[in-house]
Image: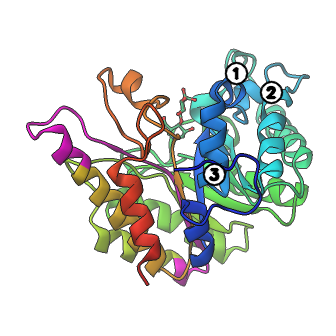
């Protein structure tokens, strides 16, 4: 395949070419280090995708490392890259319990102090990128695995209205950017996705500015989400007037008993099925994979075993999952 680096005309056999024809965004999570250092990474990213999500550099800790200091250098680099290659950017993420800096967690704050901190954080970051992003994962993983509100510093100190306050503050800072609630293990139907549905329904009913729900889609070939359940979940969110995006897809193949070829084929089927569900839904507007190639993925270190969860291999060659997505995008 021929890579046309820096071209604004998408190559007519690329994912972004076909996704554009179908009217959806096709995105990848981008890590700053390979973006800076690896020209193959940059080439494949610009050729194949029309959307990107910063994998880490817009999170609270890196972007707001001290109470009175923000660091926009790395995220600005990413946004510049996107502009140069005619790609949209999804901001990720403003409120997430896993990315809180020490200055925040090591102190005891009053409710008023913590509200001021959160408001300033959201206002500063969202204003910095005003008009430049299509979406923000405003609220990340605020529902716990047992389907109750996650016990975070925000919930403990501010109370459950921290969620709606955060959406309102973000909307004030950039009234045009689409604000998402984003979570994992809640793509189909079940207690957690019901809890998210109830939360966003309540927000909508009270006119809190929320525009979409992100289905992260960190899944595995062993128990992939049932496509009908995912379709039903997306549909009920549509009935609330909400957009849906698949925001962080990767598919673990583990070590299983089948040979590698078989596992890669199963992986391709999971990607294909989820793309099909998205294309068939009225309100599914983007499909984002959580990394570019198997060379850079959070999965092996997190699960402490090798894996190949993405759509390009370690040498950036397209895998069966890539071909499945291309086929699915072309199927009318
Ligand atoms: O892929 C990300 C990894 O590089 C980071 O170390 C980790 C902690 O910041 O976050 C990973 O991305 C997460 C995303 O931001 C939110 N959903 C779950 C993702 C995987 O943990």
In contact (CB < 8 Å): disc 1 and disc 3: no
Structural distance between the alpha carbons of marks 1 and 3: 35 Å
Percent across and percent down for residue 28 are: 58, 48
Give whichever of 8, 33 is nearer the camera.
Answer: 8
Q: Secondary structure at mark 3?
A: helix
| Label placed on residue 47 | 3
| Image side of residue 119 versus residue 310, left or right | right
Disc 2 target residue: 64
In contact (CB < 8 Å): disc 3 and disc 2: no
Structural distance between the alpha carbons of marks 3 and 2: 32 Å
Quarter of the figure with the C terminus: bottom left
Q: Residue 4 colored magenta?
A: no
Q: Mark 3 or mark 2: which is in front?
A: 3
**Could you tell me if residue 64 is visible in this image?**
yes
Sequence order check, earlier mark of 1 and 3: 3
> Which residue appears at 72% of the width and 20% of the height?
108
Residue furthest front as drawn: 2
Q: Secondary structure at mark 2?
A: loop
Percent across and percent down for residue 142 are: 55, 47
Q: Which residues are magenta?
A: 238-264
Percent across and percent down for residue 324 are: 36, 61
Structural distance between the alpha carbons of marks 1 and 2: 8 Å
| Label placed on residue 101 | 1
In contact (CB < 8 Å): disc 1 and disc 2: yes
Sequence order check, earlier mark of 1 and 2: 2
């Amino acid at each position: 395949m021929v890579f046309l680096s820096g071209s604004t005309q998408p190559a007519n056999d690329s994912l972004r070419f076909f996704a554009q024809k179908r009217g959806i965004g096709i995105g990848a999570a981008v890590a700053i280090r390979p973006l800076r250092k690896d020209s193959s990474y940059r080439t494949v990213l610009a050729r194949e995708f029309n959307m990107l999500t910063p994998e880490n550099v817009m999170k609270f800790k890196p972007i707001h490392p001290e109470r009175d200091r923000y660091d926009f250098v790395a995220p600005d680099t990413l946004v510049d890259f996107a502009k140069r290659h005619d790609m949209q950017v999804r901001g990720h993420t403003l409120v997430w319990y896993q990315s809180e800096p020490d200055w925040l967690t090591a102190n005891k704050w009053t409710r008023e102090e913590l509200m001021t901190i959160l408001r300033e954080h959201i206002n500063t970051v969202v204003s910095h990128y005003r008009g430049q992003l299509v979406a923000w994962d405003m609220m990340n993983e605020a529902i716990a695995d047992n389907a109750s509100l996650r016990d975070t510093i925000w919930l403990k100190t501010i109370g459950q209205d921290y969620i709606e306050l955060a959406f309102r503050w973000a909307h004030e800072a950039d009234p045009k950017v689409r604000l998402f609630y984003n979570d994992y293990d809640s793509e189909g139907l079940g207690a957690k996705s019901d809890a998210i549905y109830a939360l966003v329904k309540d927000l909508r009913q009270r006119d809190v500015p929320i525009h979409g729900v992100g289905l992260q889609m960190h899944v595995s070939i062993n128990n992939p989400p049932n496509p009908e359940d995912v379709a039903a979940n997306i549909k009920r969110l549509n009935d609330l007037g909400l957009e849906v995006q698949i925001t962080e897809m990767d598919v673990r193949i583990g070590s299983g008993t089948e040979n590698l070829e078989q596992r890669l084929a199963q992986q391709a089927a999971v990607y294909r099925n989820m793309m099909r569900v998205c294309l068939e839904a009225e309100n599914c507007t983007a499909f984002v994979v959580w990394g570019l190639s198997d060379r850079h993925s959070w999965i092996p270190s997190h699960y402490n075993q090798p894996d190949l969860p993405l759509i390009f291999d370690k040498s950036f060659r397209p895998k069966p999952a890539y071909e499945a997505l291309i086929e699915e995008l072309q199927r009318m």
